[in-house]
Amino acid sequence: MKKKNKKVNAAILIIGNEILSGRTQDKNIAFISNWLNINCGITVKEVRIIPDVEKTISLNVKNLSKNFNYLFTTGGIGPTHDDITAKSIANAFKLKYGFHKEAYKILEKYYGKKNFNDGRKKMAKMPMGSKLIYNPSSAAPGFIIKNVLSLPGVPSILNSMIENCKKYLTSGLKVHSQTLNLFTVESNISFKLEAIQKKFKKDVDVGSYPFFRLGKIGVSIVSRSTSKEKLKKVRSELLKLVKLKKIKILNLN
């Protein structure tokens, strides 16, 4: 993985009617976002969930791949009729769609010639020029073409493959975070919190998230930045606010 001393971003495109219908609950967004931030210094800036419709997939791939450093797609690269992600990505970039020789060999060896049916062969088809993202769980590889990394939708399989994406990524500056948990209500600190965010808006994102804990209402103030120094300054401002308002701190981390 190459290193870059600047911010690098990504988008995630979740593809699948089963997600939109509520039949399946997505678990990949949080996993990919967390992995990218911790391991690669890449920040996910946008997530979309779309149906298994070829034109919709192609349009979103074109749009997101232009606007972000990387695009991760999940779902739609299996053996069934509605697995159309690979073909749709090929169409998005006006590339030929066909068998990847190495992917074909991997799958043929895994299933054996007798059991290597048309559905399984389909998993070896992808945009021409793709590089493989190897799959240690069930053999069927994902792929990368241009800045688009295509992974399966099954969380356990995706999780096992994610490390194999590293060699295709350029790392950015790691985003650090700090959390201040307070026993108060958001309306009590909203005005001052807005002033702090405005003061550091170029370098720090400050978020406010209410909670109910130990029978009391509280607020978690989460600050995120690539600069530890800026985070220290935000923490100092927040502690001044806490002292001014005489708010009880649950914890600070």
Image (cartoon, rainbow, N blue to C red):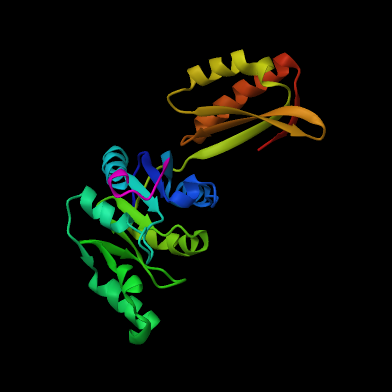
Which is nearer the eye, 68 or 99? Answer: 99
Q: Give the image location of residue 209, x and y in percent.
A: 63, 30
- Quadrant in which the C terminus appears: top right
Q: Give the image location of residue 210, x and y in percent.
A: 67, 29
Q: Residue at x 66, y 16 (%)?
A: 187
The segment highlighted magenta reads: 48-56
Check residue 55 for magenta coloring: yes
Q: Give the image location of residue 76, x and y in percent.
A: 38, 57
Measured along the vertical axis of the image, is residue 50 above or below residue 78? Answer: above
Which is nearer the eye, 162 or 73? Answer: 73
Q: Residue at x 30, y 45 (%)?
A: 61
Instruction: Tell me if I can see residue 1 in this picture.
Output: no
Left or right of 155? Residue 212 is: right
Q: Residue at x 44, y 72 (%)?
A: 138
Q: Residue at x 71, y 14 (%)?
A: 244
Q: Give the image location of residue 166, x and y in percent.
A: 38, 58
Check residue 52 for magenta coloring: yes
- Quadrant in which the N terminus appears: bottom left
Q: Quadrant of residue 193?
A: top right
Residue lying furthest right: 215
Which is nearer the eye, 153 or 4? Answer: 153
Q: How many marks?
A: 0
Measured along the vertical axis of the image, is residue 140 above or below residue 223? Answer: below
Instruction: Tell me if I can see residue 164 in this picture.
Output: yes
Q: Quadrant of residue 136?
A: bottom left
